[in-house]
Structure formats: C-alpha cells, structure tokens
Amino acid sequence: MAGAACLSAITSSATASEPIIIGVPTGLSGANSTVAPAVVQSSELAVAEINDSGGILGRQVVLEIADDGSGASGAQRAFDDLISNRNADAIITMETSAARNAGIPIVERHQVPYIYTSLYEGRSCSPYLYANGAVPEQMVGPIVDYFMDEEGSERFFLVGSDYAFGRGMLEFTRSYIEERGGEVVAEEYQPMDATDWTSIISQMRRNNPDAVIMSTAGGAPNVTLQRQYKAAGMQALVGNLSVDELTAQSMGEDAEGIYISASYLTAIDSAANRDFLERIETHFGSDLRTPNDLSVPQYDAIYLYKAAVEMAGTTDADAVIEALAEVSYDGPRGTVQMNAQRHAPLTMHLGRVQGDGSVEVVEIFEGVDPGEQCPTS
C-alpha cells in the first residue's frame, strides 16, 4: 500500500508540472490573414497574464499556433497536428466557418473541448463546442433597424461569400428584412477567394438599392469588395456583417461610412476595456494589431477556459465541458457567459466607421440573446 501511495504521489506531481496546452488553429494565410495576427496577439496576452499570476491549477499554459489556411483542408491538418502531435488540451480559436466545420469531427473523435471565438452564422452544435462570438440574431437587427427606421431604407441588396458564413448570415438577414416589410432586390455570392466584384457592383447599380448588406469572409474579401464599391462611386448605405475594426483600418478611407454590429469596439467606454487596451498596448508596443471583434473574444475565451478548468479541478474534457456553461468572465466586452445553449448573450454596439478607420458607437444594445442555437432537448 505504501508503494502504491508513493507511486500515486509521483504521478500527481508529474501531472502538476506538465503544462496545459491550448491549440490555436487560425487563418495566418488565406481570407483571414488580415485579422489572424490580432487573434494570436490576444491569445498571447491572455496566456502571459495567466502564467504571470501562477497559471491554471498551478500549471503553466503553453500556446500552440497552427495555420489553417482559412479553409477546410488546412483546418483538418491543423487540428490533427495540434491534437495528435502537440497534445492540445483544448482548441480555442477564431476561424472561418469552413475551417470550424472541418475541425469539429476531429475534436469529437479526440474528445477535446473547443471554444469557437468568431462571430458566425450560428447553429453549429457539438458536445465539445462552445461559442462566445456573435450570431445573426445579435448582429443583423441593429443594422437593418437603423437603416429602415433612421435612414428610411426600403430596398436592400445582399452580397456575400459563397460558403456557410456568407449564406447563413444573409439567409437570416433576408428573413429579417422581409418580416419588417422591406424588400430584398437581389442576393448574390462569390467564392471565398474572389477578388473581382465588378459584375456584382454593376448589378447593384442597375438595382439602385437604398442599402447594401455585405457578408463576406472576414479579412481580404471585405477589403477588395469595399474598395471596388467605393471606386465605382456607389452611394447606397453599407452594412457589413463581417468587417472588424482592424480590417476597417486596413481599408483606409474606403471604409468610411460602413455600419458594423459588434460585441467589441475599442471605443467601448468602460474601466475594464480601458485597462485591457493599456495592457495590450504595453505588451506589444508598436507591433500591436488593433484589438477587434474577431480578436477580443479570443482573449475572453482563454479566461473562460481557465475558469472552467479551475471549477472542474481538472483538464478532463467531460468535466471542463460541463463547467464551461457555468463560468463567466468580466472583460473588455463586459460579462460573458456561454450559458445560452452553448452561446453567449452579448452587449452589441452599432458602429459607424470614420475616415481614420476608428469606429464611432452609434447605439448600444445590452444583453442581446443569441436565440435558438443548440437546444438541449
């Protein structure tokens, strides 16, 4: 018995000394390459802060980054590598919907917790998946309501990238517009890697809508579409369901006037956000990529994972998955808890991009529910 107790103590000590590994597969190349570096920075800051304060359950945290190429095939390789070769205890990341959908079977096969941190089209459900980014029920209303009620818009042109995110977002948008009595004059799609939007912009000109709602893959497609839209001299209002603050800055003056709906903006006037901005600016200095609604949920998610592991008292997947619905984190976006069918009620901000790339907060919506996402019964 003494020998068994001694062996148990040695095993426990060895486990306690091993790091907790968080895998981050994200689009360092491809459509998400504009914003992915900011996602990595948010991850690095969270891990550095956690390690400086003693880690999780006394264990240091190691971050493992993999390029998913912003697509399905790259995601399969990245998830396999992170879980099978680098022994990730959890996957926490912002990715395209194509990458997420490719990764889910892999986390299910290996039974690894997965927190998806991107705004997305909603209704992605798995026993191992939680999401803390915004969904259409939280994003579409603020833009469409403002256009219709404040700007008198009645006729809408919808344009998106031809994959789950683009089509899912615009399917919800069409329904919302029509329920409100508006008209969708056209709905058009291009591949995720499209760079020439000439034919669609010509169609916009023929239809002469009051407003255009865009839902393209985050990053590069947003930039090319918006630049070509402005170059064509189009005057309709623009609401974009995927552009983030960092991407808007990369567009320069072309982004001026875009309306966005975001759970995070650097202009959020709270002590928690001011403190976060000070810490991340100090940490990265002149190399800082502007924090945004695709990177700050990543920071929150790592702290949510920390809270879940500490509540569970272990990194065991089943225990952590159960705890993730119970824990919350008070951060730059306010209090975030993934307790609504594995999604999070969020405070949403209607923003308008200014000429310098900053975003003015037009209206704030507290505690917007994500709606029906992953029913438990």
Image: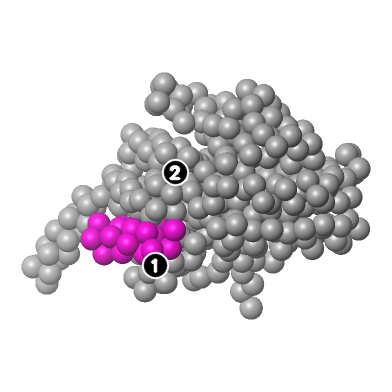
Q: Secondary structure at mark 1?
A: helix
Residue 267's place in the image compared with 338, above or below, is above
Dominant SS in magenta: helix
The front one of 79 and 194 is: 194
The front one of 221 and 273 is: 221
Residue wearing tag 1: 107
The percent position of residue 155, horizontal first and vertical second, equals: 86, 51
- Distance from label 1 to label 2 (Cα)? 23 Å
Left or right of 373, for residue 213 = right
Please tell me whether mark 1 or mark 2 is closer to you in this view: 2
Residue 47 quadrant: top left
Is residue 74 found inside the magenta-colored segment of the image? yes
Residue 2 quadrant: bottom left
Colour scheme employed for the rendering of this structure: one colour
Q: Residue furthest left?
A: 3
The front one of 267 and 377 is: 267
